[in-house]
Image (tube, rainbow, N blue to C red):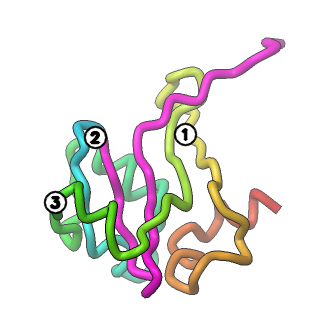
Amino acid sequence: MKDRISFNVNAELYADQFDELAVRLPGNHVFRDVGTRPGRDFATDVAAALAGRMPEEWHEMPAHELDGRDWRCISLFGYVDGEEDQPALEMEVPAAQLGEKARAYLGAALVAAR
C-alpha cells in the first residue's frame, strides 16, 4: 500500500450568497447555471465536461466574476493519483454551511463524507 496519494484537482465548485453555483474548469473557464437540472450531480457533470461533453444548461461567464458576489469554493473534483477511473471530491466547507442547491448537487458525495 502506498504511504501517500496524489489528488489532482481538475475542477472547483463555487457557491455564492444566493446559493447559485458555478464551476471553474482547467484553463480558467468558468460556468454558471450549474446544478439546475434535477437528477444531475457535480462529479458526473464535471467528468462529462472534462471529456468534452459540456452540460447544455451551463453557460460560460467571465472568470473574474468569481472574485465578486461573495463566491467561495465549496468543493474540488479530481482524480486520485491522476487515474481517471478513480474520481474523487474534496469538500472545502462543512456540509452545514452549504445551501440547499449545493447540498442537492453534491448529493452522494455528502453522504459518503459523513
Cα gap from disc 3 to disc 1, whole angstroms = 27 Å
Percent x, y for residue 27?
A: 23, 37
Amino acid bearing label 3: Pro
User: If the image is split into quadrants, where does the N terminus sit?
Assistant: top right
Find out whether residue 10 is within the magenta segment: yes
Between disc 2 and disc 1, whose residue precedes?
Answer: 2
Q: Which dot, 2 or 3, sits closer to the camera?
A: 3
Query: Disc 3 marks which residue?
Result: 62
Q: In this view, does 59 lie to the left or right of 92?
A: left
Image vertical order of residue 55 relative to residue 53, above or below: below
Q: What is the crowding at mark 2: few (fewer than 14 residues within 10 Å), some, or many (at least 20)?
A: few
User: If the image is split into quadrants, where does the C terminus sit?
Assistant: bottom right
Q: Give the range drawn in magenta.
A: 1-25
Is mark 2 in CB contact (under 8 Å) with mark 3? no
Query: Disc 2 marks which residue?
Result: 51
Q: Is residue 94 left or right of residue 37?
A: right
Percent x, y for residue 69?
A: 35, 76
Image vertical order of residue 80 relative to residue 74, above or below: above
Residue at horizontal 16%, vertical 60%?
62
Find out whether residue 72 is within the magenta segment: no
